[in-house]
Structures are given as structure tokens and as C-alpha cells.
Image: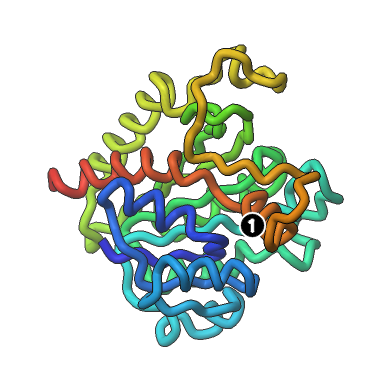
């Protein structure tokens, strides 16, 4: 499947979908220069554009046709750690992402944002997708659901096109969401009191893929950039689980 990744960060969606055997990226869009370096290091042949707003001006020309579109769009307008200005925040770019979706009509869309988005802005996202002929369902899944030793609760939005001209049917979409829900309940986002209580976990398995870049570490090259990049990144192991379910439906069709 052809994958366009907006607000790419350090490539969490691309990595997760590749681990799932779902897709390879054909386009990144990321404005942060350090993140661009990471993307080029791991996906040398994939073009990187910088500004989602510029893509939205003429997506027919600037964005290639794709089967799946993803975006971990900026959380600052919705985060409880900020001023929560929502649509009044200069970093609110959801309308531009929706313009691209409406033009390119990917079969699947997967988005990620902070849990604060649920009470501010999520209704707009779901309403916009529905108005454009997509069925969408949000899931709250934390990093602890894939055995990370911290909560990092995030809202994940999985959307599928309902148009008869698109390649997947509404029934298959419901099967996919049912399978995601089932895996959510059985382990993808298992919220155990020991792992997800907000305290330091004592019985969680060691998450070998989580790097240790302590905030008081000395002598770590590009430490500030690394911490910022990790802080803004999605959890690729969650994207992998969503990707595996989508792949199963795609392969079965």
C-alpha cells in the first residue's frame, strides 16, 4: 500500500507500518530540520516536503495518490499542558490536512494526538471526516499498552472511505474496527494498574526499544533535539498493531 505521512516527526508511522508489513512511505512532510535528518537517514529515497499548508494549496499536484494517509498533527492547540486555544492556535493545521484528504481520497487514514484532543477539537475531526464520506472511530491507547514503562495516553483515529468507488467496503471497515477494538481490550492498550497508574512501574516488562536519554544526561549529542523528537513522536509499536489489522483486511479483500 502506498503511504503518505504528514507531520512525520522522526517516522513513527512509517516504522510501525513497515514492521507490520503494511506499506512503505512514498512522501514525508515535516517542518523540523532535525527530524528531517532522521527521516533521510532511514528512508533515503523518500522525498521530504516541509509545509502541510503549502501541500493543501494544491494537493492534486503536490501529493501523490496513496492508499493510506497518516498524520500525528500538532498537539499544542489541544494539550492540557498548553493554553488550549484550539482552532485559534497558529499551529492548528487540521483543516489543511482535511483538504488533502478530501482531494486525494486515500482508502485509509490514521491520525494521532494527545488525549486532551478528546474534549477539544476531536468532534470537528470526526465530523469533517464523516462529511467527506469517511467512517472514523477514535481509540485511546497508551504506550503502556505495548509494554512501555509509562502511560503516554493518546487518541488514535482510524478512518475508512465509504465511497463505493473506493476499494474497501463499509463492512470491511467495521470488521477492522472490531478487530482493533478486540486487540485493544486484549492487549494492545491494556491499562494495568501496575503499568498505567502514573507511578513508576515495578512489574512491567523491560521495553528494550525505549532509549534512555535522561533529561539530566551529560555528553549526549543533540540531546535537546532528541528529547524534543521523542516527545513529539508517536509510539510505532501501536501504529504497528493498527497496521497489522488493516493489512489483514487488505489481504483478505
Q: Quadrant of the N terminus?
A: bottom left
Q: Residue at x 15, y 47 (%)?
A: 251
Residue positioned most to the front = 219
Residue found at x 58% / y 52% = 233
Residue at 47%, 73% (x, y): give it. Answer: 40
Up-down relation of residue 139 to residue 52 (above or below): above
Residue 14 rendering spot, x and y as whole percentages: 41, 58
Dot 1 crowding, Cα within 10 Å, few <14, some 14–19, many 20+: some
Q: Residue at x 54, y 30 (%)?
A: 148
The residue under label 1 is 229
Residue 9 picture location, percent across and down: 57, 61
Left or right: 37 with respect to 82? left
* Camera sees residue 130: no
Q: Secondary structure at mark 1?
A: helix
Nearest the eye: 244 or 36:
36
Q: Nearer the viewer, residue 52 or 50?
A: 50
Which residue ends up furthest to the left in the rendered image?
252
Amino acid at each position: 500500500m502506498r503511504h503518505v505521512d504528514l507531520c512525520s516527526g522522526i517516522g513513527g508511522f512509517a516504522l510501525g507500518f513497515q514492521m507490520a508489513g503494511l506499506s512503505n512511505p512514498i512522501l514525508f512532510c515535516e517542518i523540523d530540520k532535525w527530524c528531517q535528518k532522521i527521516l533521510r537517514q532511514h528512508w533515503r529515497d523518500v522525498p521530504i516536503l516541509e509545509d502541510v499548508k503549502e501541500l493543501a494549496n494544491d494537493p492534486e499536484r503536490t501529493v501523490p495518490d496513496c492508499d493510506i494517509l497518516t498524520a500525528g498533527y500538532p498537539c499544542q492547540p489541544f494539550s492540557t499542558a498548553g493554553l488550549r486555544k484550539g482552532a485559534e492556535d497558529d499551529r492548528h493545521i487540521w483543516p489543511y490536512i482535511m483538504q488533502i484528504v478530501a482531494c486525494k481520497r486515500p482508502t485509509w487514514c490514521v491520525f494521532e494526538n494527545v488525549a486532551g484532543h478528546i474534549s477539544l477539537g476531536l468532534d470537528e475531526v470526526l465530523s469533517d471526516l464523516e462529511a467527506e464520506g469517511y467512517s472514523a472511530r477514535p481509540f485511546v491507547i497508551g504506550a503502556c499498552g505495548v509494554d512501555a514503562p509509562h502511560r503516554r495516553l493518546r487518541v488514535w483515529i482510524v478512518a475508512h472511505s465509504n465511497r463505493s468507488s473506493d476499494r474497501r467496503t463499509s463492512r470491511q471497515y467495521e470488521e477492522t474496527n472490531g478487530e482493533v477494538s478486540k486487540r485493544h481490550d486484549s492487549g494492545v492498550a491494556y491499562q494495568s494498574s501496575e503499568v498505567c497508574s502514573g507511578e513508576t512501574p515495578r512489574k512491567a516488562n523491560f521495553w528494550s526499544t525505549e532509549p534512555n536519554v535522561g533529561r539530566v544526561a551529560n555528553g549526549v549529542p543533540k540531546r535537546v533535539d532528541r528529547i524534543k523528537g521523542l516527545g513529539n513522536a508517536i509510539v510505532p509499536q501501536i501504529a504497528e498493531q493498527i497496521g497489522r489489522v488493516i493489512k489483514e483486511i487488505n489481504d483478505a479483500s
